[in-house]
Image (cartoon, rainbow, N blue to C red):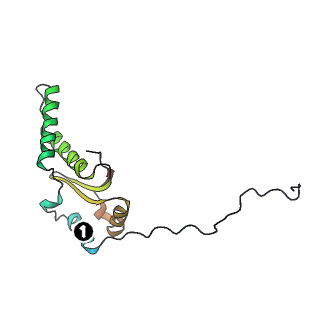
């Protein structure tokens, strides 16, 4: 029974006094960290860039032709074409996933995908080496 000198407690009783254990942090293997360091150091190999397989490239070329038919006289060229190809390559390989990327004129490089890998990337790479890394969710293909 409650009385003015004995009110009900305002907060419920805590059933579990300690928080649930957190998942252990993911640390990337040394080979993955070495790849990150190599790429961020400027030593990019052609295989680091995302590419589209022939069937996907044919689909993107069809899209270009369709867009050009909607706007006669205007072609999809230069920077517009490059940006669309990079975006489609990212969507093809990592659509719907959270990724850490580097954009270069030659293409797009995915450094890590998923929260755990991206966290490991940011723990392994410090300071100025992080410049240019973009974290985004790629559109679905």
Q: If the image is split into quadrants, where does the N terminus sit?
A: bottom right
Position in image of residue 43 (x %, y %)? 16, 65
Above or below, 32 against 55 in this view is: below
Above or below, 94 against 44 in this view is: above
Name the residue beneath numbered marker 1: 37
Residue 49 vs residue 106, the one in the foreground: 49
Within the image, what quadrant is residue 88 found in?
top left
Position in image of residue 45 (x %, y %)? 14, 63
Q: If the image is split into quadrants, where does the C terminus sit?
A: top left
Q: Is residue 120 left or right of residue 106?
A: right
Query: Residue most toward the bottom?
Result: 30
Confirm whether residue 76 shows in the render: no
Q: Secondary structure at mark 1?
A: helix
Please state the total of marks drawn on the protein image: 1
Query: Residue most toward the front?
Result: 55
Within the image, what quadrant is residue 129 found in?
bottom left
Above or below, 61 against 2 in this view is: above
Q: Is residue 22 left or right of residue 73?
A: right
Residue 54 vs residue 134, the one in the foreground: 54
Residue 62 vs residue 67, the one in the foreground: 62
Above or below, 52 against 12 in this view is: above
Residue at point 22%, 48% (across, down): 92
Position in image of residue 69 (x %, y %)? 13, 27
Within the image, what quadrant is residue 17 found in?
bottom right
Position in image of residue 135 (x %, y %)? 33, 54
Confirm whether residue 61 shows in the render: yes
Residue at point 13%, 36% (across, down): 62
């Amino acid at each position: 029974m409650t009385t003015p000198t004995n009110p009900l407690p305002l907060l419920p009783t805590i059933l579990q006094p300690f928080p649930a254990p957190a998942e252990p942090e993911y640390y990337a293997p040394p080979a993955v960290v070495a790849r990150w360091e190599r790429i961020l150091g400027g030593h990019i190999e052609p295989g680091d860039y995302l590419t589209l397989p022939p069937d996907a490239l044919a689909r993107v070329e069809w899209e270009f032709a369709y867009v050009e038919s909607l706007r006669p006289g205007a072609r999809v060229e230069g920077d517009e074409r490059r940006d669309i190809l990079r975006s489609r390559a990212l969507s093809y390989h990592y659509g719907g996933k959270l990724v850490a990327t580097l954009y270069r004129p030659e293409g797009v490089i995915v450094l890590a995908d998923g929260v755990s890998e991206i966290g490991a990337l940011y723990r392994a790479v410090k300071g100025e080496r992080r410049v240019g890394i973009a974290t985004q969710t790629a559109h679905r293909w």
